[in-house]
Image: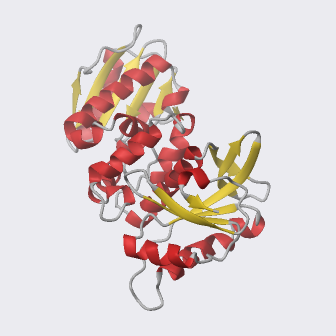
Amino acid sequence: MAGPLRFRLSHEHWDGARLRRDLYEPLDATIGARLTTPWFKPPGGYDARRLEMDNGDRALFVWGDDAYWLGNTQTPEALWRTDKYSFDEVAYPVARWAQRELLAELELQDPWLARYRHLAWFFLPVLFSKDGRRSSRAFFADHAAGFPDADRDDALAFYERFLSTGVFDDERYTMAAKLGTSEHVDSTRMSATMGEFNAAKVLADAGYAPEPEIEMDSGYALDFRATKNGESALVEVTRPGRPTGRAADTPTAAARETARSKTDGQLAAHPETILFVDCSSFRDDEWAALAGERSAVGHRPAVVFRARPDGSIAGYCDGEVALDLAAVGIDP
């Protein structure tokens, strides 16, 4: 399975003739391709072409002193030994040009998604990835980004508002890649990923800076370090799926079961970590039952919460939580 979209950088000499011979002709021979001009003027000092494959794959190639390939298709042999770089790691004019090309294409293909401009930009490496471009768009379109009984546009507007604050701009690949690049929609796993964004929103709205993927000496990585006024706390996030309705699968049981997967690993090694249990997959009655009982989830300290697309947050703390979350609707 291919990962998020990245550039390949070549330091060799390229011109139009070599592009046609080493890139276009091999692709045309194997899967069918068209060589076209770019939609936007390339950066100064560069020439550029689009390669559009018969199977729907796309690639951009831009060359000057160095050459950059960005594609969600098979890589031609001439570029096999090149290194991969994210949008943030290549020359800014090249990255900006390439993203304009892709965002314009997204606007033609899925205008309902492209109008959420920061969300579309943020998840661009996944939305145009080789394996995940269809599944990621389907998750946003058909599963309302993990919110039950929610309008798709309300859900996307929720994440647009949060991401447009720039909170994760510097960690874009780290966070966007969590959505995954599988060919198939795994709504449970993908909703769990959005649970991390929900937890980060709680932290950010409470005035904390959430730093993702904290590598620990134990070998584990924790989801966030939350810092405010020079003080920090470690946070791990889990998101239970909806209760099935069976007698043994109540909202409390669902929350405890998903928490158990963390207590046997990261939290056993780092018991001081605050567990955020995101119950945003629960419907109103399911959440009311859990919150009404203020149920323990099997680890303390814990924050049990639910986010809604209108931006509202409700929840409660279990144990002594070293975070001040009262301002965002989390009861201590």
Which quarter of the figure is the C terminus placed in? Answer: bottom right
Which quarter of the figure is the N terminus placed in? Answer: bottom left
Side of 327 relative to 186 (left or right): right
Q: Position of residue 13 (x, y in %)?
A: 46, 15
Instruction: Please name the residue shown 28% across and 18% down the image.
Output: 40
Seen from the viewer's position, the closer of residues 245 and 192 is 245
Snapshot quadrant of residue 44: top left
Instruction: Please name the residue shown 68% across and 61% down the image.
Output: 274
Q: Position of residue 48 (x, y in %)?
A: 33, 18
Q: Residue furthest top?
A: 45
Instruction: Please name the residue shown 43% across and 31% down the image.
Output: 78
Side of 110 relative to 278 (left or right): left
Side of 288 relative to 234 (left or right): left
Side of 129 relative to 324 (left or right): left
Seen from the viewer's position, the closer of residues 25 and 314 is 314
Snapshot quadrant of residue 284: bottom left
Q: Is residue 107 above or below residue 284?
A: above
Q: Residue furthest bottom?
A: 247
Q: Is residue 110 visible?
A: no
Q: Is residue 286 visible?
A: yes
Q: Residue furthest right?
A: 217
Q: Is residue 249 above or below residue 65?
A: below
Snapshot quadrant of residue 103: top left
Q: Position of residue 266 (x, y in %)?
A: 70, 65
Seen from the viewer's position, the closer of residues 64 and 93 is 93
Q: Position of residue 3 (x, y in %)?
A: 46, 47
